[in-house]
Amino acid sequence: MEKLFISRDSLKKLLDRLARNLNLVAPVKDPEGIIMFGPVADAGQVLLEYQNSTLPPKSFFFPQTERLFKFSYGQEGMALEDMCGSDKRVLFGVHPCDLKSILSLDPVFAGAYKDPYYINKRENSAIIGLACSNPSPGCFCATFGFGPDDGEGSDIMLTPSGKGFDADVLTDKGQEIVASYKDLFEKAGDSPRIAGETRLTVKKLDLTGIKELLDGNFELEYWNQVFEKCLGCGICTYVCPTCHCFDIYDSSKGGCDGERYRSWDSCMFTHFTMMAGGHNPRPSKKERVRNRFMHKLKYHIDRYGLAGCVGCGRCVKSCPVNIDIRRIISDLGEVSRNGQL
Amino acid sequence: MREIARDLLESGQVNLVIGYGRGTGILRTTPVFIRKPSDAGQLVYNPLCGNNLVKYLLDQRNKEGRAAVCVKGCDSRAVNRLIQDRQIDREKVYIIGLPCGGILDPDRVEGAVDPGEEIKETVISGEGYDLITAAGKYSFTMAGAGSEKCSTCQNHNPVVYDVMAGDPSDTPDIKDDGFDDVRKIEEMTVEQKSAYWDRQFSRCLRCYACRNSCTACSCRECVFDQVNTGWVSRSSNLSENTAFHLIRAFHVAGRCVDCGECERVCPVGIPLRVLNRKILMDLKDLFNTATPGLTPDGERVLGQFSADDPEEFM
Ligand code: SF4
Ligand code: SF4
Ligand code: SF4
Ligand code: SF4
C-alpha cells in the first residue's frame, strides 16, 4: 500500500480530469436538498464532505431497473440481443459503510452464481472512498467492526488531513489512477488524520447473543410487538445499501418483440412471496418484518459470513413509523439475556 | 389521553387504542397499539406526532371489537372519509380527539437538538413550542420549524371525535387557503413545470410509502401491484414514475383529505401534497365544495350520483 497526499485544490483538478476522461459518479445535492450519487461533469457540484446520502451508490452496480436483453421472433426464429455492458467509471466519495455494503453484495452477485451484469459494472468501476469527517447521529457502523475511516472495499481511500486528504492506494486499480495523474499527488505528510476523533463519536451497539437467539428461534413473541405499525412500504429496503432482491419481467409493446428487465423488489411488499397458485408463505406483516431483520442479523451471516447490515442508518432516518433497527438490536439483546423484554 | 385510554380498555368499550408512543430519540414518535390498561402510560402526545394513524383502522376492518384511535384535526377528516366510503363502521371506532397547535418538521428541528435526547415535557409558548429535555430547553416557532402543511391548517381541532383529550386548541384555523404552493407552480412556464416535475419524479423510488400511508388508498388490490395489466410496469424510470404519480393523484381526487402524510413519508422529498392540492383547488373552484372529510355526511364530489346534476352533455 502506498501512502500519498492530495491537496484540496489538486483533488478538484483530479475530479475535473476524471470527469473529462472517464465517467465520474459522485455525491451531489439537488435543489430539494436530497443528497444522491449521480454522474457529474466537473468538480463543481461534488460534495467533499457530507453526511450519509439519502440513497446509497448501490444502483451503480445494481440499478433499480436494469434491461437484461431484447428478444424478437421472426422467420429465422427467436433472436436475442444481449444488453450487458458498462462504461469505465470512477465512483468518488464513497463512505466506509457503503464500501462495506458493496463487499456484502459481491458474494451474492459474484459468488457461486455469477451475475454478468453486476460483475461487468464492478470490473469497470474504480472506487475512491472518503472517510467521514462528520458522521451523522444515526450512524452505527462501529457495531459491525469497522469505523468512519475504514478503507476496505475502495481502490483509493481518502482521509481528511491538514489542508487536504491522505490518499491510501489500496489496489492495482487505485495504482492506475495515481499513475495517470501523478502530478496531483504528493508524499504523505504527518498531519494527523481527522478520522481518529470521529471514530469515537460513532455508536457501537452490542450484538452479543443476537445471532444465537435468532439461530434457535424462528418464532419469537417479540415480533408481535414490532410488526403492527409497519406500513409495508419499500423504504427500508430501497434505501438500504445491502438489500438486493429483484424480480424479472418481460415487456412488449405488442408483436413478437420486447425486452426482459429486472427491477428491485422488497420483502416488505405483500406480493413478494406470492406463489402462482395464490399461496403466500409470508401472509402478514409479521412474517415480512421478521424476515427483514432475520436477513440483516442472521441469514446474510449464515450464507456469506458477512453482516447484512452495515450501520449506515438510512432506514432509521427514512422509516415513516420509526421501526428502528438500532432499537431492534437492543431489544433482541435484551430478549436473549432475559427471555423477554 | 392516558386516562381516557385506560378507562376505555378497562371498561371494555374498546379492545385496542392506537396512539403515539416514544420513538427513538427526540425527533421521532412511533405508533403504538395498546391492548392492556396498564400499558396506557406508553402514550405520548407532543409536536413530533406527525403520523396520521387513521390508516391503521383499515387493518381493523374485519376484526372483532371496537378500536380507539388518536387523531389530530387533519387526521380526523380521514376518519369521516373512510366512514363515507363504508371502509369503516362508525360504531366500531372510538375517536380520541387531540387538539393541535401545529406539528414540527423533524428535518427542520434536527440541526438544533441532540437527537439522542428525549422530550420530558412540551410547553406551548407564543407561536411555537418549548421542548424540555434533561439537558434543558429548546424553543421552536411554527414559522421557523413547523410542518409546511400546518401553515394552511383549517382544523386545529378534530372535526369528528367521541372525546377530546384536553382543551381545544385556540390556534386560529385558516379560513381561506390561498393555495400559494400550487399557484407558485402554476406561474411557471410549461417548460419550467416540466423540468420541475421531471426532476421530482425521476427521484421516485416507487417504494409506495405514499400509497401505503394514505387513507384514501384503501383498494384491496392496488392497480400498481397488478403488473400483468400493463397500466404501469414495475420498471422505475421517468415515464413509468410519471404515470404512477398522475394515476395516483387522479385516483385520490375528491378523497384526499390534505393530511400531508404522503409528503411526510416520502424518503426523497417529492412534494406530493402540491399535486393533490392542485386537484383540491380545482375541485373547490369548480364545485364550490369543502375539503373532503370536513363533515361526516359531506358531499362526495366525484363519488355520488344526483339526478339533477346540471351536466350539459348528459
Ligand atoms: S438495514 Fe438500515 S442501517 Fe443497516 S445497512 Fe440497511 S439501511 Fe443501513
Ligand atoms: S394540519 Fe392542523 S391539525 Fe394537522 S398537524 Fe398541522 S396544525 Fe395539526
Ligand atoms: S413515497 Fe416518494 S419515493 Fe416512495 S413511491 Fe411515493 S413518491 Fe416515490
Ligand atoms: S393523498 Fe396524501 S394528503 Fe391526501 S389523503 Fe392521501 S396521504 Fe393524505
Image (tube, rainbow, N blue to C red):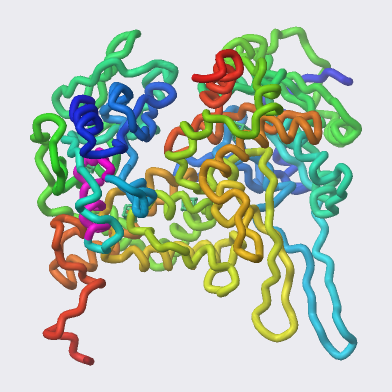
Relative vertical location of residue A18 with respect to residue A225 in this rendering, above or below:
below
Q: Is residue B261 above or below residue B289?
A: above
Residue at 50% of width from left, 55% of height from top? Answer: B199
Q: Nearer the viewer, residue A290 or B279?
A: A290
Q: Residue at x 25, y 39 (%)?
A: B14
User: Which residue does the image show at 25% across and 72% down from the upper left?
Assistant: B302
Ligand 2 placement by image quarter = top left
Q: Quadrant of the N terminus of chain A?
A: top right
Residue B172 located left or right of residue A289: left
Nearer to me, A109 or A21: A109
Regarding residue A52, the answer to whether it shows in the image is: yes
Look at the image and tell me whether residue A164 can be seen: no
Image-quadrant location for residue A295: top right
In the foreground, B144 or A268: A268
Q: Position of residue A301 (x, y in %)?
A: 75, 30
From the viewer's side, name the closer residue of B87 and A267.
Answer: B87
How many numbered markers are drawn? 0
Q: Is A141 on the left-hand or right-hand side of A158?
A: left
Image height check: is B186 above or below A304?
below
> In this picture, which residue range is highlighted in magenta?
B66-83
Return the x and y of residue B258 as percentages of the image width and height.
27, 53
Q: Magenta stretch containing residue B67, yes or no? A: yes
Residue B215, position as x, y percentages in the image? 33, 54
Q: Position of residue A200 (x, y in %)?
A: 61, 10
Please report the residue visible at 58 percent of the width from the left and 68 percent of the height from the top. Answer: B227
Asked if residue A150 lies in the magenta stretch, the reply is no
What secondary structure is the stretch in magenta mostly built from?
Answer: helix
Q: Quadrant of residue B29?
A: top left
